[in-house]
Image (cartoon, rainbow, N blue to C red):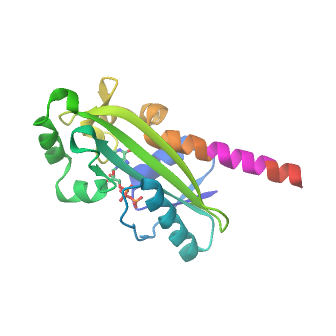
């Protein structure tokens, strides 16, 4: 069983569909440090969450990096979604030249169990478009990948290509290897 510290039910749904292990959501609002680097934010967050909860835990820090805005909102994606909303992010991007509307979703999954904090990164390229679709969560309606927005995809289809699933795949491989070596060491 894996404990996922997050307040975001969309992240939990995707992790549950993707990972073979049972995923339990733990709601603890760990402080997010100010940094341009998602891995630093995730590593600091998971350390704090582990100290608070006292059990092995993982977190997921994600962001949308828009080319025309030099990667903004990036690590500030949550704040910008809450304050501006994705419709306004689209309207700002719409003013930019069409070939400047490229973007990338990034996720860093960080795991802590008292030893070294492990981080796993995933990203996916796409472009910013007018909102379409009612699936997914967050910025999904304005992020198009190969002709469809993430909000137009099922969880399964999004998981086949997404930033989060790419980070979770590395995490899952690492867990499998760790379990394998602890079995061999027995
Ligand atoms: P926790 O920190 O509690 O896990 P959060 O939603 O605040 O939840 P982040 O700090 O990682 O998560 O914020 C990332 C922002 O990007 C937030 O606005 C999310 O809605 C959005 N986001 C993250 N993953 C996404 C995805 O797969 N598709 C669309 N938007 C996403």
**Considering only vertical position in the picture, is 102 above or below 90?**
above
Q: Residue furthest right?
A: 186
The residue depicted at 44 percent of the width and 47 percent of the height is 107
> On screen, 167 above or below 99?
below
x, y percentage for residue 127? Answer: 27, 32
Residue closer to the observer: 31 or 33: 33
Identify the residue shown where x is 65% and y is 42%: 173
> How many circles with numbers are drawn on the protein?
0
- Left-right relation of 186 to 80: right
- Left/right placement of residue 164 relative to residue 68 reads right
Q: Look at the image and give the residue range highlighted in magenta.
A: 172-180
Residue farthest toward the bottom in the current orientation of the protein? 52
50 left or right of 80? right
**Residue 85, horizontal then vertical, whole percent:** 19, 52
**82 versus 89 height, above or below:** below
Task: Name the image quarter holding the N terminus.
Answer: bottom right
Closer to the camera in the image, 23 or 129: 129
Q: Place residue 163 in its image quadrant.
A: top left
Q: Is residue 79 left or right of residue 120?
A: left
Q: Position of residue 33 (x, y in %)?
A: 39, 67
Residue at the limit of the structure toward the left, as seen here: 95
Query: Mostly what secondary structure, the magenta segment?
Result: helix
Q: Position of residue 180 (x, y in %)?
A: 79, 46
Q: Residue at x 46, y 45 (%)?
A: 14
Residue 17 visible to the viewer: no
Q: Residue 98 magenta-drawn?
A: no
Rendered-image quadrant of the C terminus: bottom right
> Is residue 135 visible in the rendered structure shown here?
yes
């Amino acid at each position: 069983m894996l404990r996922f510290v997050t307040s975001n039910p969309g992240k939990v749904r995707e992790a549950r569909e993707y990972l073979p292990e049972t995923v339990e959501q733990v709601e603890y609002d760990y402080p997010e440090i100010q940094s341009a680097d998602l891995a630093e934010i995730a590593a600091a967050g998971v350390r704090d969450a582990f100290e608070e909860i006292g059990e092995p835990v993982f977190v997921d820090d994600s962001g949308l990096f828009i080319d025309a805005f030099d990667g903004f909102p990036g690590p500030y994606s949550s704040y910008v979604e809450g304050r501006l909303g994705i419709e306004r992010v689209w309207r700002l991007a719409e003013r930019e030249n069409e070939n400047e509307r490229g973007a990338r979703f990034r996720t860093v999954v960080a795991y802590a169990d008292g030893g070294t904090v492990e981080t796993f990164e995933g990203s996916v390229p796409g472009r910013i478009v007018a909102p379409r679709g009612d699936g997914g969560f967050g910025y999904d309606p304005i992020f198009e990948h190969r002709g469809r927005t993430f909000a137009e995809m099922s969880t399964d289809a999004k998981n086949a290509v997404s930033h989060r699933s790419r980070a979770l795949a590395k995490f899952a491989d690492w867990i499998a290897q760790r379990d394998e070596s602890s079995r061999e060491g027995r």
